[in-house]
């Protein structure tokens, strides 16, 4: 009997050994993928935050990163970053289909963007920018696949922001002459508005990361980085970014306190806010009716730093191509012979006041991809915002979340809200190579992943 049992025992030991070796290989592949993903995200963010023209402040007064997409250097850098990220698709091939399934609204929207290139007024620019933006999306999906631990991904993003903040502070102090412009501190960036956006993102990222640290020393360090980024933001004189940072500081604690409450309490507060706004509007209209004045006359006096002139022009162009638009990325910085703004004598089309964005991301999406593209983009953003708020609430009220996980969940949800507000005054949402246009893809892909994982975990518990 002993001799008969011996072969079975040997086969069992071989199977156990094979399982151990397979698990060891899987762990090594997972560690390799995570390390590669973290390197890719740091390098990508450094390039996105700095750009390919460091300390070059001689561009248009209203310059934007999207203008740099015609640079062959920019193209090669994005191809190199994609080449570095591509192995992650193989290392995580078992999860790839699920990842693509989670991002189906974005993929469908990109299909529509590709369709609009067929109607583009500058097909070369449209196709080039769509290709670059598709590479951005693939890099973001690869990073999310390779970094399953959101806490480590948050740390990598914070590290990139800390490096950029250190460069900006050094430039401000020791390279003051080449870092300052007549409009404000631009630092290593090509324009003071880009400096403001980079500083806002760094302050927000490092501040949220600081709250996720367990030790006081780590909190003090990352809090110091966030304060340094805030100081750089103030020096940039970027009013939109300054206003958003102030709103984040004031509103985030209130939103988190509200999300900790029971659902009836949340609905009650939201109803109160709606009632207060409605009462204020009714009171204002009644007051002006008694005075015999137009209650909306003051709107004509608001220019938002002369943005309303640009908005009116872009709207007039959008309604003339309501369904297809003029092609993805094919309205600003295109062939001068066909660029709509350069066919006018408006102030923002002059060489000394060149404008290459509508200063409203939703108008830019409408004019380039039509009402279908705008509706799809809003659906994607509101979906991310809803899921992000859900992640924030679950991290606050559900057990099992540590401090770092809670900080990352809040970071994801709050950034989606921040992009929604930011695009009322600037254009970045679904804008190829725009700073926040790239970052929102990473944050959105991460929101989809974390929301799906949370839902699966809740289902398994049930």
Image (cartoon, helix red, strand yellow):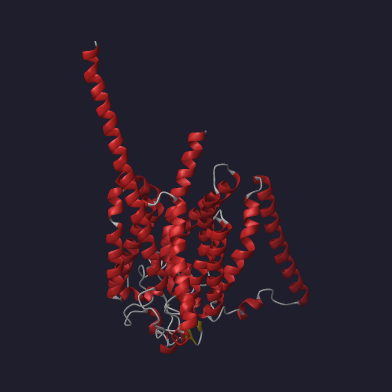
**Towards the viewer: 338 or 452:** 452
The answer to whether residue 132 is left or right of residue 424 is left
Determine the image quadrant of residue 212: bottom right
The answer to whether residue 175 is left or right of residue 86 is right
The answer to whether residue 14 is left or right of residue 403 is left
The quadrant of the image that shows the N terminus is: top left
Vertical relation: 313 (above or below) 95: below
Asked whether the viewer can see residue 371, the reply is no
Which residue sits at x=30%, y=69%?
Answer: 77
Which residue sits at x=43%, y=69%?
Answer: 435
**Towards the viewer: 156 or 318:** 156
Vertical relation: 433 (above or below) 35: below
Figure label count? 0
Residue 42 screen position, x and y as percent: 39, 63
Residue 386 screen position, x and y as percent: 53, 52
Residue 225 screen position, x and y as percent: 52, 68
Residue ranking furthest to the front = 2
**Towards the viewer: 309 or 189:** 189
Residue ranking furthest to the right = 290
**Towards the viewer: 221 or 315:** 221
Determine the image quadrant of residue 337: bottom left
Asked whether the viewer can see residue 225, the reply is yes
Residue 96 screen position, x and y as percent: 33, 47
Which residue sits at x=37%, y=51%?
Answer: 145
Which residue sits at x=51%, y=85%?
Answer: 183
């Amino acid at each position: 009997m002993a001799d008969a049992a011996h072969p079975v025992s040997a086969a069992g030991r071989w199977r156990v050994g094979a399982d151990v070796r397979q698990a060891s290989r899987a762990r090594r592949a997972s560690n390799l993928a995570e390390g590669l993903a973290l390197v890719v995200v740091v390098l990508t963010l450094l390039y996105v935050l700095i750009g390919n023209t460091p300390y070059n402040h001689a561009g248009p007064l209203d310059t934007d990163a999207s203008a740099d997409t015609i640079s062959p250097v920019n193209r090669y850098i994005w191809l190199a970053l994609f080449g570095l990220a591509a192995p992650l698709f193989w290392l995580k091939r078992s999860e790839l289909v699920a990842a693509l399934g989670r991002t189906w609204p974005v993929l469908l929207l990109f299909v529509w963007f590709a369709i609009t290139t067929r109607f583009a007024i500058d097909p070369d620019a449209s196709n080039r920018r769509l290709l670059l933006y598709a590479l951005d999306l693939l890099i973001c999906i690869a990073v999310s696949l390779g970094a399953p631990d959101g806490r480590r991904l948050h740390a990598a993003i914070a590290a990139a922001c800390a490096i950029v903040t250190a460069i900006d502070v050094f430039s401000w102090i020791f390279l003051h002459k080449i870092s300052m412009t007549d409009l404000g501190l631009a630092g290593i960036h090509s324009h003071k508005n880009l400096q403001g956006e980079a500083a806002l993102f760094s302050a927000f990222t490092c501040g949220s990361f600081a709250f996720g640290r367990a030790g006081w020393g780590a909190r003090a360090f990352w809090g110091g980085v966030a304060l340094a980024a805030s100081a750089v933001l103030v020096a940039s004189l970027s009013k939109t970014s300054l206003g958003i940072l102030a709103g984040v500081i004031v509103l985030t604690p209130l939103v988190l306190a509200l999300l900790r409450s029971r659902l009836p309490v949340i609905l009650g507060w939201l109803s109160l806010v709606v009632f207060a706004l409605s009462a204020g509007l009714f009171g204002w209209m009644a007051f002006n009716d008694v005075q015999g004045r137009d209650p909306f006359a003051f709107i004509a006096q608001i220019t938002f730093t002369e943005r309303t002139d640009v908005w009116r022009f872009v709207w007039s162009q959008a309604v003339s191509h309501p369904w297809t638009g003029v092609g993805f990325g094919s309205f600003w910085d295109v062939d001068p012979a066909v660029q709509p703004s350069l066919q006018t004598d408006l102030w923002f089309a002059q060489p000394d006041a060149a404008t290459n964005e509508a200063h409203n991301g939703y108008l830019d999406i409408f004019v380039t991809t039509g009402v279908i593209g705008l509706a799809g983009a809003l659906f994607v953003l509101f979906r991310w915002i809803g899921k992000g708020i859900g992640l924030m609430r679950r991290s606050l009220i559900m057990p099992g979340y540590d401090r770092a996980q809670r900080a990352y969940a809040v970071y994801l949800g709050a950034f989606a809200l921040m992009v929604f507000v930011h695009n009322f005054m600037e254009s970045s949402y679904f804008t190829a190579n725009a700073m926040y246009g790239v970052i929102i893809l990473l944050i959105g892909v991460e929101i989809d992943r974390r929301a799906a994982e949370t839902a699966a975990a809740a289902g398994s518990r049930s």
